[in-house]
Image: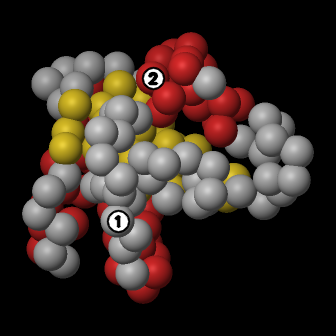
Amino acid sequence: MRKKAAAAGPKATTKREAVAPDMLEQSLALITASLEDDKAEDIVVIDLAGRASFADRMVIATGLADRQISAMAQHIERKLRDIGIKRVMVEGANGSDWVLLDTGDIVVHLFKPEARTLYGLEKMWGKELDEGAEGNVTRL
């Protein structure tokens, strides 16, 4: 379990308050549309509700170059700010194989292909891990 938490997102120090379902879905739609516009590959949304305390959804996508991944992160952050989500934590945005954005309710992982394979977050959090978690992974 420790490896899962470390690779998936920041450690929660306080209990996260639930967000309104419509705001969660609006944010998720904005994030996935932004990634599609930026030509992200293999976009996956994982439902974490009831399975993790740090977020309700995880979005994983692949970019082919540092510059593309950095631009995807910047675009998401700006678009979320435009709809009123001001506190987005971003890690690894300065030329890395992996950028993480944490909105509090949604954690977004942007990877280069090799890093995505190495960390294997879909395997850690996907339906293969938990019995009864059918349908928690959506590929776009």
Q: Residue 17's mark?
A: 1
Looking at marks 2 and 1 on the same chain, the residue that comes earlier in the sequence is marked by 2
Locate residue 100, reporting x and y percent.
32, 36
Residue drawn where x is 78% and y is 35% of the image: 129
The residue wearing badge 2 is 6
Per the image, label 1 sits on a secondary structure element best described as loop
Q: Is residue 14 left or right of residue 122?
A: left
Look at the picture and state if 109 lies above or below 59: above
- Identify the residue at the far bottom of this view: 22
Rendered image quadrant of residue 112: top left
Mark 2 or 1, which is nearer the eye?
1
Q: Residue at x 18, y 68 (%)?
A: 85
Amino acid beneath label 2: Ala
Residue at 30% in and 47% down: 14
Q: CA distance from mark 2 to mark 1?
A: 21 Å
Q: Position of residue 34 (x, y in %)?
A: 33, 62
Q: Is residue 101 shown above or below 30?
A: above
Disc number at residue 133?
none
Q: Residues within 10 Å of mark 1 (few under 14, many from 20)?
A: few
Residue 10 picture quarter: top left
Rendered position, 109 above or below 28: above
